[in-house]
Amino acid sequence: MKLITAIVKPFKLDDVKDALKAAGVQGITVSEVRGFGRQGGHTETYRGAEYKIDFVPKARLEIVVADDAVDGVVDAIKAAASTGKIGDGKIWVTGVDRIIRIRTGEEGHDAV
Amino acid sequence: MESGNITWVLISAALVLFMTPGLAFFYGGMDRNRNVLNMLLMNFYCVLVIPVLWVAVGYSLSQTPFDNDFIGGFDSFFLKDITVAGDGMTLAVVAFLGMFAAITPALISGAVADRMKFSAWAIFVPVWSLLVYVPVFKWVYGGWLADRGSIDFAGGTAIHVNAGIAALAAVMVLGKRKSSPTPPHSMPLVMIGTGILWFGWFGFNAGSALAANGAAAQAFMNTFLAAAAAGLAWILIEWLRDGHPTNLGAASGIVSGLVAITPAAGYVSGPAPILIGLVAGAVCCYAVRLKHKFGYDDALDVVGVHFVGGLVGSLLIGFFANPDFFEGAFMEGIFYGGGAELLLEQAIANGATIVWSFVLTYGIMVVLKKTIGVRVSEESEAAGLDLAEHGETAYNG
């Protein structure tokens, strides 16, 4: 089992969700996060004074999938989240030691 | 006719009361999200403590007896001898003026935002009201400044210049905020506050005619026009200079126009309110940048908007005052056949107010600093005053 974490542009979240559903993913967890990467921030002007806004709003998705589903899910996110412009985000994959479904107590593959 | 007058004064009093929550939202939206409740209570506290103080001693000390040019007397403490006999107008005026007394120290809260101890504010407000607001009010309305010939329809000098320069003195003692300023935490709150202020300001200015008459109608129209013109001037300058017309620019322009027309509302007519608004919006749009140049931390621009706007409006009376139009007993402005005499008296009235208010406010703040302290701890300042000073947070769930 793998944990796929993706940071995407917030306005692309719906497209990514639809692509993941189409790819057969049964559940995702989404958080509203802020951060900066190569895109950097932007400036806002209030009463003529400039404020540098370093942290840009992003959406973070977390999905746990079986090993053989990883490539399909990564490709789906990559395609749906891409605008070709700086700030499109990142996807990373990490190993998961254990997974439990709380209601039934099922573990491992059955709990994904 | 008397029932019409008292009706208008009572409605105006309620309108002026509504300005304090309006000001609280205007400031609170500009403030950071962990200090917004502190800002709201600094404002609401003024409508808790000042009405009591005003009825107890403030009204009497600023109004009676009229044969003294510097301070009133004790004759009307706790509304002694003020009755509802006749039309009850005196009582209505006490209430109306009490609302003015309440909002004046509230104006200062925007400058000291993000760092002043609430206990220090709680003492500052009534002390400042008695030592600064009450005497200046007496000088301007029935004291030596009025006798010399200066005029102030609804409180440009007595309220905005007075509170504006006090804000400068207060932040000079208080010092700068530890962390760098942040953008407004809620611009929609700022815009709601601006709308409430504009609405309430019709009572502030048109109510100051103290009658339902033509001067009230002209003051109403002037309040409408000056705010619009000043907001327009501010966003046009921003658009050309910074590339975007902003909501905060529109709000700041509207308030600067309202401030500037306040002293002039019942003395000018025709195109004058538009010109006063345009000048005030343009001047204040640049004046809010002075703090960056001179290094005082006036958090929400009380000096740039209220002091500068009030001064601009009060001095422009020297050009635009039109006694023939109002059949009034005041001097003509330069554009209406007068000499520079009225302008000179306006300058003297504002100069005297500036000196008195700055020196006394500075003194009050130094005494507070040396006794109970005026600043919250660095830890509280970083964590936010809402939790540290009030045990509340604004946005939960």
Image (spheres, coloured by chain):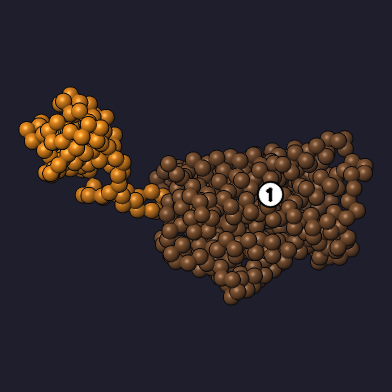
Picture layout, residue A25 above or below residue B33? above
A33 vs B192, nearest the viewer: A33
Q: Is residue B366 left or right of residue A5?
A: right
Can residue B301 be seen? no
Q: Is residue B123 left or right of residue B391?
A: right
Give the color of chain A as drawn.
Answer: orange
Q: Which residue is mark 1?
A: B262
Return the x and y of residue A17 as percentages of the image width and height: 23, 29
Q: Is residue B28 left or right of residue A53?
A: right
Return the x and y of residue B324 as percentages of the image width and height: 81, 45
B168 vs B74, nearest the viewer: B74
Give the color of chain B as drawn.
Answer: brown
Give the chain of mark 1: B
Kindly give the residue lying farthest to the front in the view shown: A105
Return the x and y of residue B7 as percentages of the image width and height: 80, 37
Q: Amino acid at mark 1?
A: Thr
Residue drawn at (20%, 26%) of the image: A21
Kindly give the residue lying farthest to the top in the view shown: A22
Kindly give the residue lying farthest to the left in the view shown: A68
- Name the quarter where the N terminus of chain A is drawn: top left
Mark 1 closeness class: few <14, some 14–19, many ≥20 residues within 10 Å: many
Can residue A37 be seen? yes
State the image quarter where residue B169 is shown: bottom right
Where disc 1 sits, the SS reads loop
Return the x and y of residue B36 as percentages of the image width and height: 51, 51
Residue drawn at (60%, 44%) of the image: B22
